[in-house]
Image (cartoon, rainbow, N blue to C red):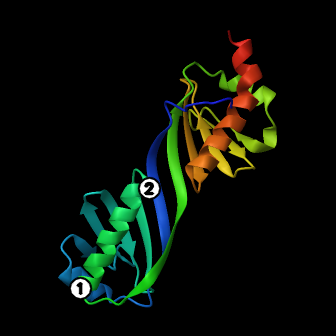
Amino acid sequence: MDGKTYASLKIENIVASGVIAEAIDLAEISEKIDGCELNTKRFPGAVYRIDNPKMASLIFSSGKVVLTGIRNEAALDEGLAKVLASLKEAGVKVLDVPRVAVTNIVCSYDIGRFINLNRVVATLSLEAIEYEPEQFPGLVYRIKDPKIVALLFSSGKIILTGGKNLDDVRRGLDFLEESLKDVLTEQK
């Protein structure tokens, strides 16, 4: 929307997943890598936490990995490189070109004003909305293109999830603000 800066848009979490090896011996890596835990009674993969950048990797015997807790794309690249280096050091033959991609970005945004959620329900397409204030204080709004789910709170805070990149999140936010324009104008 006309040169918007999205000043309050903040990445809360990036989740990435993919394949990094043909197979991984989880018992072996959990013994050899500090910070790598394996408890197959609780979870079928190894959990490897690193502090810088702060993230957790879920590593599976199939060679697949899920990375979470990441706050920016540079940290994703750096964290993945550290995970791969630790696995190589532990004797795992990792793929020359790991196939890991962002699967979800969770962002927060503050629209800067009160949102009358009941008016939103009355104004927007009902099949895209879930709102049960006695169950959950936020309104769930499903945007079709880009495929983003927005949680709206009366405080003006919004959580956006489902984007694969920040452009998707911004497009979803633009669509949401355009959809809410009449509701927000009526509140003035």
Disc number placed over residue 79 in the picture, else none: none
Determine contact: label 2, label 1, CB under 8 Å.
no
Indicate whether 106 appears above or below 56.
above
Q: Nearer the viewer, residue 76 or 58?
A: 76
At a point 29% along the width and 81% down the height, the residue shown is: 87
Cα separation, mark 2 vs mark 1, equals: 26 Å
Question: What crowding class fits label 2: few (fewer than 14 Cα within 10 Å), some (14-19), or many (20 or more)?
Answer: some
Residue 35: x percent and y percent?
A: 21, 69
Q: Residue at x 23, y 85 (%)?
A: 90
Q: Earlier in the sequence, mark 2 or mark 1?
A: 2
Q: Quadrant of the C terminus?
A: top right
Q: Residue at x 52, y 52 (%)?
A: 105
Instruction: State left or right for residue 131 relative to residue 60.
Output: right
- Identified by mark 2, the residue type is Glu
Q: Comparing marks 2 and 1, which lies closer to the viewer? A: 2
**Residue 10 picture location, percent across and down:** 46, 39
Callout 1 secondary element: loop
- Can residue 20 be seen in this snapshot? no
Q: Is residue 175 above or below residue 155?
A: below
Q: Is residue 22 left or right of residue 175?
A: left
Instruction: Please state the horizontal and vertical placement of residue 157, each as a whole percent of the image.
Output: 53, 30
Q: Which residue is mark 1?
A: 90
Residue 77 appearing in the image:
yes
Q: Residues within 10 Å of mark 1 (few under 14, many from 20)?
A: some
Is label 2 in a helix, a strand or a loop? Answer: helix
Q: Please give the label number shown on residue 73.
A: 2
Quadrant of the drawing holding the N terminus? top right
| Left or right placement of residue 146 versus residue 20 in this view | right
- 116 or 168: nearer the eye? 168
Residue type beneath disc 1: Ala
